[in-house]
């Protein structure tokens, strides 16, 4: 099968890394894979990672704003269509909803090429096209979304390559030397620094370091993103107050595995949390506002159902780093517990999150999607429904094709599959 795998941007993050891992796994299973990505500014380190993996990469530069009446970036949709034609693509797999919409209004609407969408966030928008298969990363999300779609979403928990992410494979000592960490107890965060799901937890961790005021412990944040400046300011403020480097902001690494290997305690959300577990690090799961919970045999089921993240209890204080500080102190004081919980997390990854098992499930989803027919009338009606839902109209017009044509005329007058 000839696959086009679409990344919604090229900054290092869990969704993008999972997409690349699964694309490489699909190639190993005999498929021809082309990677497509949207970027704004510079392509970023993920582009080099894709090329290093030997996958063809097609880039299109575009602002992130959704422009016009339709929830689609016309330039991105047109480029996707042209790539699909040129590469004789048989299926498009788009990650996250901006690129899923571009793919729907591009190669799917125009050519009828099957589309699979993966949404690794905590919700799937109601206005997302309903009939293309949707993959989510947590059972709780799948259960919430199932009543809104003709077919329940598929569940593929964020996979981890346990061959390349493993204890002893990467030497964390060089990372420690390079950043002057010495023999400190390193609390490590490896994450894209963005405001919706990551900022709160990392800001809480920075606050916990000030509250702990323990010279044995350093917080090391590896990653970049739109929240870097704000978090760096918070880190500088705490370091100034404590008179030492309690919080170290590393920035982005093309290969973040040395940061995982160097940590004694891991803080994380989603795919980053899972990769820390693969390195046998004890894990404190972060979330929004004050959420922080230790992964243990008794809490594991909560995260297996709800995903490796959490939400703030609105009955608690607006900002309270004390519970997180207490968890960090307990792990810092108990090396035996760190070892025990690290081994538990590693085994959980091996049992539940292997890349090979995820790639087998994904191949079945691809086969099912390709076997379906997608008549033009179905595609048009769904395009109209999405547009109406996004623009707040009360009901679909009587003639969806006539109503939709002025907005998507270029997509309706081209040769292609019916």
Image (cartoon, helix red, strand yellow):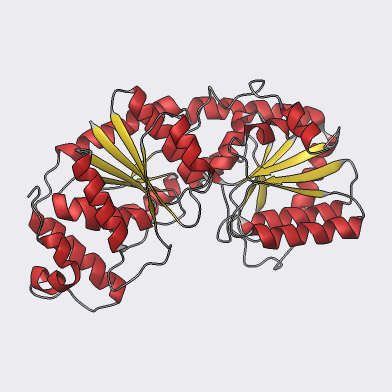
User: Measured from the top left, where is residue 29 in percent x and y?
Assistant: 32, 23
Left or right of 75? Residue 251 is right
User: Measured from the top left, where is residue 364 in percent x and y?
Assistant: 27, 32
What is the quadrant of the N terminus in the image? Answer: top left
Q: Residue at x 29, y 40 (%)?
A: 4
Left or right of 138? Residue 76 is left
Asked where in the image residue 181 lies, by quadrant, the reply is top right
Left or right of 295? Residue 81 is left
Q: Nearer the viewer, residue 85 or 377?
A: 85
Left or right of 104? Residue 271 is right
Q: Nearer the viewer, residue 347 or 401?
A: 401
User: Measured from the top left, where is residue 304 in percent x and y?
Assistant: 51, 40
Q: Is residue 147 visible?
A: no
Q: Establish if 260 lies above or below 163.
A: below
Number of marks: 0
Q: Residue at x 43, y 45 (%)?
A: 139
Q: Establish if 45 lies above or below 413.
A: above
Q: Establish if 322 lies above or below 162.
A: below
Asked where in the image residue 267 lies, by quadrant, the reply is top right
Q: Is residue 206 visible?
A: yes
Q: Residue at x 21, y 41 (%)?
A: 86
User: Measured from the top left, where is residue 407 in percent x and y?
Assistant: 19, 71
Q: Residue at x 65, y 28 (%)?
A: 280
């Amino acid at each position: 099968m000839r696959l086009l795998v679409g990344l919604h941007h090229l900054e290092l993050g869990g969704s993008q890394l999972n997409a690349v891992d699964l694309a490489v796994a699909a190639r190993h299973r005999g498929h021809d894979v082309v990677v497509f990505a949207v970027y704004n500014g510079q392509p970023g380190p993920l582009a080099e990672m894709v090329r290093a993996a030997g996958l063809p990469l097609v880039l299109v530069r575009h602002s992130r704003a959704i422009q016009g009446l339709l929830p689609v970036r016309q330039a991105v949709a047109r480029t996707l269509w042209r790539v699909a034609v040129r590469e004789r693509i048989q299926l498009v797999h788009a990650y996250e909803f901006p690129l899923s919409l571009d793919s729907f209004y591009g190669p799917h609407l125009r050519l009828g090429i099957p589309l699979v969408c993966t949404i690794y966030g905590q919700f799937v928008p109601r206005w997302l096209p309903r009939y293309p298969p949707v993959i989510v990363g947590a059972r709780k999300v799948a259960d919430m979304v199932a009543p809104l779609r003709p077919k329940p979403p598929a569940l593929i928990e964020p996979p981890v390559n346990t061959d390349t992410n493993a204890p002893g494979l990467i030497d964390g000592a060089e990372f420690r030397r390079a950043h002057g960490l010495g023999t400190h107890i390193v609390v490590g965060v490896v994450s894209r620094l963005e405001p919706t799901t990551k900022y709160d937890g990392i800001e809480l961790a920075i606050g916990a370091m000030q509250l702990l005021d323990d010279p044995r412990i350093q917080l090391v944040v590896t990653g970049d993103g739109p929240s870097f400046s704000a978090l760096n300011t918070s880190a500088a403020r705490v370091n100034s107050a404590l008179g030492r480097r309690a919080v170290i902001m590393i920035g982005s690494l093309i290969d973040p595995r040395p940061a995982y290997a160097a940590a004694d305690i891991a803080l994380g959300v989603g795919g980053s949390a899972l990769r820390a577990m693969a390195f046998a690090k004890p894990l404190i799961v972060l979330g929004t506002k004050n959420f922080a919970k230790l992964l243990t045999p008794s809490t594991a089921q909560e995260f297996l159902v709800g995903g490796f993240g959490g939400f703030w209890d609105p009955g608690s204080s607006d900002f309270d780093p004390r519970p997180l500080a207490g968890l960090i102190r307990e792990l810092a004081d108990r090396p035996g517990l760190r070892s025990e919980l690290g081994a538990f997390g590693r085994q959980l990854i091996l049992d539940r999150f292997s890349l090979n098992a995820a790639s087998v499930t994904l191949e079945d989803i691809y086969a099912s999607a390709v076997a379906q027919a997608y008549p033009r009338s179905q595609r048009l009606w769904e395009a109209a429904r999405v547009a109406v839902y996004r623009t707040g109209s009360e009901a679909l017009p009587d003639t969806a094709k006539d109503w939709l044509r002025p907005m998507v005329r270029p997509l309706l007058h081209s040769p292609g599959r019916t």
